């Protein structure tokens, strides 16, 4: 097992940066609320940019709201090796989701610069814009932006206060008119590596600090809009009602049954947000909107379950004399990590005395989008009780430091001309 006081990276500096970043948008003792494109994220970006510059990188904010630090390579024209993650958080999130990947990357580059190492290929560290997706109901914005995967209506999406993504980008200092200038030309990204906390319980179970990701489940995000007719809660007989919430509740239960039908499958499904109108206890609800998040590494199965869900919603709506509309917010295919990067991670981790297990990611990451333009890999870091998207999320300083060390070694190999 690797001994943490023999690490090349600076564990103390990494830990200090993690603690300082957690102050931006701090909630309670350990929670964080750092919405994408918010004033608080802007302040946090300024801090991260300062650390990137201290680490020997030049920095820029692109027009998609990504913060990008660049460590020049011996061959500045060579396609870049990219690493990073995100620092936007869930509304009541933890302090390790995303931040670990950004700050371990900055630490890896800082160590390179201190040792006077100039990689063959340039390396860029990216803090991607809006990975989480809850503010505008569609995530992975920054990675979709640089890979040319934005939709036509993307900038018109509104948050709960009616602010458009376009306005939020402007307020953040970006120029949405020039958003396409942020796209990297084909072939200019050599490869991508992301470190992230596991957000699940497996590494703790097998008593290992790090894991090697094999693939990422693809998320399907839908919004279901159910319409009925409002009426008096005390007078309309039960058999005359068009209660949108009674119908939506049945749809949600049906969705759970669909996703659970095969206990051996990796499919998961969540309804995480629900709006009821007009929202009065003595009015029969006439409109309900709820979100669907369904994921699987098996795209065919996910598609089959989606068809079952659509059919159930139609049948339930008919039974309650309702109408139902299903809007697609995000549909991303699952993807498998590149063999050569998994192999680099494996051999470097073995060299460190680790026996890192291979594992799939149920959570999505910017890496999933980067896979559309380049080879990619991921390193997972153990997190306590598998808790994430929760203020109780926790990864130890030792585990993060060992993760940063493995990332440092992996990046050095990926940035060598002879590596792939
Ligand atoms: C990312 O935060 C996800 O929901 O997987
Ligand atoms: Mn994340
Ligand atoms: Mn997250």
Image (cartoon, rainbow, N blue to C red):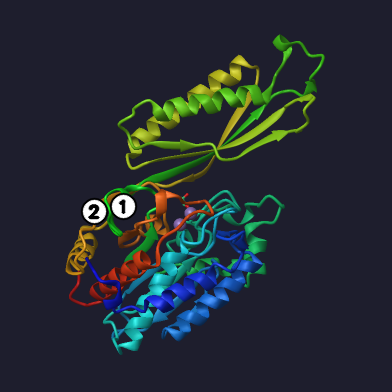
For residue 203, which numbered disc appears in the image? 1
Q: Is residue 321 above or below residue 171?
A: above
Q: Is residue 104 visible?
A: yes
Q: Is residue 62 visible?
A: no
Residue indicated by mark 2: 357
Q: Quadrant of residue 179?
A: bottom right
Q: Is residue 40 left or right of residue 391?
A: right
Q: Is residue 255 left or right of residue 378?
A: right
> For the residues marked 2 and 1, what is the alpha-carbon distance in whole angstroms?
8 Å
The earlier-in-sequence mark between 2 and 1 is 1
Q: What residue is shown at x 45% (from left), y 25% (from top)? A: 257
Note whether ligand 2 is within 8 Å of mark 1. no
Q: What residue is shown at x 40% (from left), y 63% (from top)? A: 396
Q: Is residue 309 left or right of residue 42?
A: left
Q: Is residue 162 above or below residue 82?
A: above
Task: Please tell me whether mark 2 sits on a helix, a strand or a loop.
Answer: loop
Callout count: 2
Residue 14: x and y in percent read: 42, 74
Towards the viewer: 17 or 303: 17
Callouts 2 and 1 close, C-beta under 8 Å: yes
């Amino acid at each position: 097992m690797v001994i943490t006081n023999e690490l090349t990276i600076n564990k103390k500096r990494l830990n200090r940066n993690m603690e300082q970043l957690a102050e931006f948008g701090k909630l309670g003792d350990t929670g964080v609320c750092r919405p994408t494109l918010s004033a608080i994220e802007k302040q946090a970006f300024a801090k991260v940019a300062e650390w990137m510059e201290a680490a020997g990188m030049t920095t820029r904010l692109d027009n998609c709201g990504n913060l990008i630090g660049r460590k020049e390579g011996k061959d500045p024209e060579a396609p870049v090796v990219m690493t990073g993650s995100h620092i936007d958080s869930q509304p009541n999130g933890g302090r390790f989701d995303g931040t670990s990947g950004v700050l371990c990357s900055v630490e890896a580059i800082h160590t390179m610069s201190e040792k006077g190492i100039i990689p063959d290929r340039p390396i860029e560290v990216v803090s991607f814009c809006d990975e989480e997706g809850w503010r505008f109901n569609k995530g992975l914005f920054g990675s979709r932006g640089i890979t040319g995967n934005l939709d036509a209506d993307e900038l018109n999406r509104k948050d709960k206060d009616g602010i458009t993504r376009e306005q939020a980008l402007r307020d953040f200092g970006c120029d949405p008119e020039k958003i396409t200038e942020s796209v990297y030309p084909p072939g200019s990204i050599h490869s991508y590596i992301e470190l992230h906390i596991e957000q699940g319980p497996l590494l703790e179970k097998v008593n290992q600090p790090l894991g090697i990701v094999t693939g990422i489940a693809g998320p399907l995000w839908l919004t279901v809009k159910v319409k009925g007719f409002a009426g008096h809660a005390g007078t309309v007989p039960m058999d005359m009602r068009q209660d949108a919430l009674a119908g939506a509740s049945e749809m949600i239960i049906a969705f759970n049954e669909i996703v659970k039908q095969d206990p051996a499958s990796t499919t998961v499904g969540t309804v995480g947000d629900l709006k009821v109108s007009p929202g009065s206890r003595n009015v029969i609800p006439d409109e309900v909107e709820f979100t669907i998040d369904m994921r699987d590494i098996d795209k065919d199965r996910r598609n089959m379950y989606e068809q079952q869900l659509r059919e159930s919603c139609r049948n339930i709506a008919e039974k309650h004399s309702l109408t139902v509309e299903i809007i697609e917010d995000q549909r991303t295919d699952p993807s498998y990590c590149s063999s050569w990067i998994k192999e680099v991670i494996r051999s470097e981790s073995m060299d460190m005395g680790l026996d890192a297990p291979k594992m799939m990611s149920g959570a999505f990451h910017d890496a999933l989008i980067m896979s559309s333009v380049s080879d990619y890999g991921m390193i997972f870091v153990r997190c306590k009780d598998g808790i994430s998207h929760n203020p109780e999320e926790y990864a130890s300083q030792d585990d993060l430091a060992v993760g940063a060390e493995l990332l440092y070694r992996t990046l050095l190999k990926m940035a060598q001309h002879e590596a792939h």
